[in-house]
Every structure is written in structure tokens, then in C-alpha cells.
Image: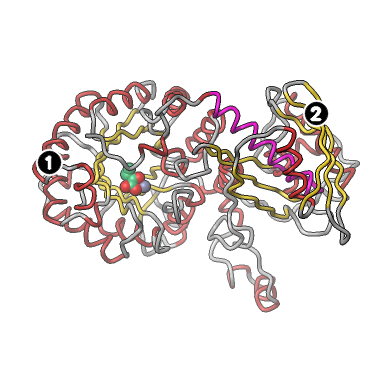
Amino acid sequence: MTDTSKQDQVLIFDTTLRDGEQSPGATMSHNEKLEIAGLLDEMGVDIIEAGFPIASEGDFEAVSDIAKNSKNSVICGLARASFKDIDRCMEAVKHAAQPRIHTFIGTSPLHRDITALDMDAMADKIHETVTHARNLCDDVQWSPMDAIRTEHDYLCRVVEIAIKAGATTINIPDTVGYTIPRESSDIIKMLLERVPGADEIIFATHCHNDLGMATANSLAAVEAGARQIECTINGLGERAGNTALEEVVMALKVRNDIMPYATRIDTTKIMNISRRVAQVSGFPVQFNKAIVGKNAFAHESGIHQDGMLKNSETFEIMRPADVGLSGTSLPLGKHSGRAALRAKLEELGFELADNQLKDVFVRFKGLADRKKEVFDDDLIALLHDTAGGEQNDRVKLKSLKVICGTEGPQQASMVLDVDGVEKSADVTGDGPVDATFKAIKEIFPMTTRLQLYQVQAVTEGTDAQATVSVRLEEDGKIATGQSSDTDTVVASAKAYINALNRLLVRREKSAPGADVKEVKYTDAS
Ligand code: KIV
Ligand code: ZN
């Protein structure tokens, strides 16, 4: 095994809670953000970008609470190039033992046009705002948004200004996922060669995945001298997403022979956080996704299986255990007791308090009554089922009966508890799920639009649970709900109701004019 202790460190900057969460539909609740931040901290992420404090009261609270709870990670907040943004950001991150302000402005011709600032006016603004940030905080990161499409001379000029004004990290974003590895590397090399003071700060790389090259571009930047990679769990992020943390970290680990750089990440925590982010964001991981996809370690073909049995290295460049996948273990069943359940959950990395275990045990027994064997993935789905668990949910499913089959129309008879009052509906539809969703709408009318309806089998077999994700939108507000059940229609109803309850919370909490989606790429003037 390679001794990485003397190698150059590459800092891992995770922006799942900022750039990832800004992806439409990936909105997380306050508690979910705190939980994910805790997992990131625990796995060794150097810097957590916790949010965009000026964007909304909710974002501000989340960044402040993450800052208060952080143990080892630097906690960073995003701010546009305005004193107001930067002050608000500092207010939120100041609670962290190691706070960071990340301020940015779009420097490419397209972005300069939007802000109506010419090159000189923008250069002045960068000087003023970075100086202001540095007066508040010792750790300041500056980003020329759309750096890749910024004229090289101008990029060198503004990077120099930001360094002179006190920036300690300069991030080079490929905002639209436009670059290729050679260019990503050349730009970092150019900045290191041409900009005075460049050797005293850290260069970061921030790649989007529009052309599917985010991981390759990030690694190319590191080879050229960047020492911070900005990434998200599962590559979550707008459009095709951001660089996936698990991909760059595992690439650096597996190919340490030719990329001799160390990270602080405990890679055995990857699977657990990947599942949790998929769950809370409502963005399931595609089966063939590198590192964390369901098939990433599956060897189906006969030739592969034969080779694997003789020597696992034939077709495996990393071991499942390296990313926290336990080997095949025995499933639980309806005779399994509480101690067996606790032991299994601990093996999967979940330590539950006694009252939590009690609740999970009741649900486990319910599942084991319906399903002969309860596999690890069933338990994980059960633990992460967000539907129906909240005492203060306004809408709860009491009962659902569905008639379906070849003789239509299909019919759903549903009873919901709405604010403590039972209401029912009998509705026909084009299929059982359509009838079920129509029944919910009849009982609780809302002008929501269904943006996503997705079903995934948790395990194999006809008695497998289905995990259903539902994304609803109302007046630009988006909420995702999820639920798992052996009955796909019940899982669908619960996921819809879960999304509805979350949307209702967002509706109640929303402050006029304060929505992160609206301000993301609008530079402050
Ligand atoms: O992609 C981007 O340019 C960003 C900046 C705000 C750093 O996310
Ligand atoms: Zn970005």
C-alpha cells in the first residue's frame, strides 16, 4: 500500500448543500442539511459549502447551524460581489471554528454584459468586494464565474487583483461544463506561470458535467497544480450536475501510482452518504453510475463471474469494502429479534437510539410479515422512508383501496386525515396510480404540477419493495417526497403525500422575494 502521508494534499470542497441543493427539485429540509453536513464532516471533507446565506432565511439558518455544529471541516458560505451579501455570509459562517467566505462574480463577456460592467469597472468591484471579505474573515475564496470562457489576459488580471486584495483560494469554475481536460490543465498552468503571487494561494477547480467530463477536467486541473477540488455527492447539481466527489476521490486513491496526491476522505463512508443524499434530494443514483451505482460492483456476465471467483482483481480495480459496501450478508426475516436488527443496522453504519430502534423495529416487523426475506437494501429503504413519520404533517394517509386490471376504469377509494379531519374520495383514473393521485387532489385541492414520478425496485424478486419519488411544483416552489412499500400504489400515494406536506411547509415559510433559485446566477450590482 502506498504511503500517502508525504504526498501533496488535495483539499476536498463539497458543495452538495449549495450547488447541489440549488438543482431544481433537490431542495432539502433544515434537518436533512444538518445531517448531510454531519456526514460530510465525519467522512473528512476539508471544506463544506453549506449554502448561500443571503438567498433566504432558511439558507441563512442552515449555514449558521451547520457552522455551529461543525467539528473538523471549514464551513463556507457563498456571497455575490456585494457588501450586503458578504456581510450576511459572514454573519452565518462566523459560528464555525474555521469560517470561509466564498465570493464570486461572472467575468466572461456574457456575464459582464449582464452586469453592465466593463472590464475596468468589474476589476474595481472585485478589488472592493474581496478586500471587504478579507477584512471580515481570514479565509476568503474568490471565483471568476465562467472562468473558462473569460479572455485569458482578463482572467490573469482579475485573479491577480483578487490575490492582492487578500483571497486565499482562487476557484476556477467551468460554470457551463464546456471545457476539456487539456484546456482545464492549461488554464491552471497559465495562471500559475503568469499571475504574481499565484504560488502563495490555493487554486481550486469547479467543474460542471454538461459534456460528461467533470471528473476528468478536475483531475487534469490537479495535475497542473490545482490543490482543491469542488464537488458534490453523486455529482448532484443543476443540469448534468457537478464533479462527483466519489469519482475524484476514488480515482486519486486507485491511481495513486500516477496521480500521487492524498485526500483526507474516509472512503468507506462513501456508500452511506451517497444513499442518504439520493434519498433526501429525491435524485436516485443511476444503476451504472461509477463508484456508487447499484451495478458498480455487480458482475453478471459468465466470463466476469468466473474470473472474479478465481481472482477478484481480474475485474475489480477497487474492493466494495473500500467504498463502504459490506459483502453479501444474510437477510433478516419475521423471526429476527430486536438484537439482530440492531446488529445488522450497526453493520450497515446506522447507530440508532433506543426509541428510534423501537420505531424501526415495528416497521421492520410490518415489512417482514409481507416479505419473506428483508435484505440490507430493504432496511436502508425503511430507515430512509420519510413519508408518514412526521407528527406535524398536515395530510396523512389513512387507507387506500384500488381496483385495477384489464377491465377499466381503474378506481381508487381513499381516506386522508387532513388537519385532524378524515376526508374520503372515490375516483377513477387512467391506471391505479393516476386514480390515486386524482383522489389526493380531490380531497386536498392544490394547483401543484407533477414534475417527476419515478419507481425503483429496492431488491430483486416479485415481493420487492418499490421506492417511489414524487416531485411537485407550485408557484416555482418545488418539493420531493419518497416512500417505499411492497405495494407500488401505496408507495406512490405516500410519496405524493410526503411531497405535498413538504410543499405546504415551504409555502408557509416562504418569505417574499427570497428564493435561492432566483438569485443564483444574477450578479449583484
Ligand atoms: O458554477 C459556478 O460557476 C458556481 C460559482 C458560484 C462558483 O457555482
Ligand atoms: Zn457551480
Q: Which residues are magenta?
A: 483-508
Q: Is residue 297 above or below residue 123?
A: below
Any mark on residue 424, and which? none
Display colour scheme: secondary structure
Q: Main secondary structure of the magenta part?
A: helix
Using the rendered image of the protein, determine whether residue 477 is visible from the camera's viewpoint: yes
Left or right of 88? Residue 19 is right
Residue 103, x across and y down, in percent: 27, 36
Left or right of 381? Residue 320 is left
Using the rendered image of the protein, determine whether residue 228 is visible from the camera's viewpoint: no
Q: Nearer the viewer, residue 84 or 364?
A: 84
Q: Earlier in the sequence, mark 1 or mark 2?
A: 1
Q: Is residue 132 above or below residue 437?
A: above
Q: Residue tagged by mark 1?
A: 123
View quadrant of ligand 1: top left
In the picture, residue 398 is in which quadrant?
Answer: top right
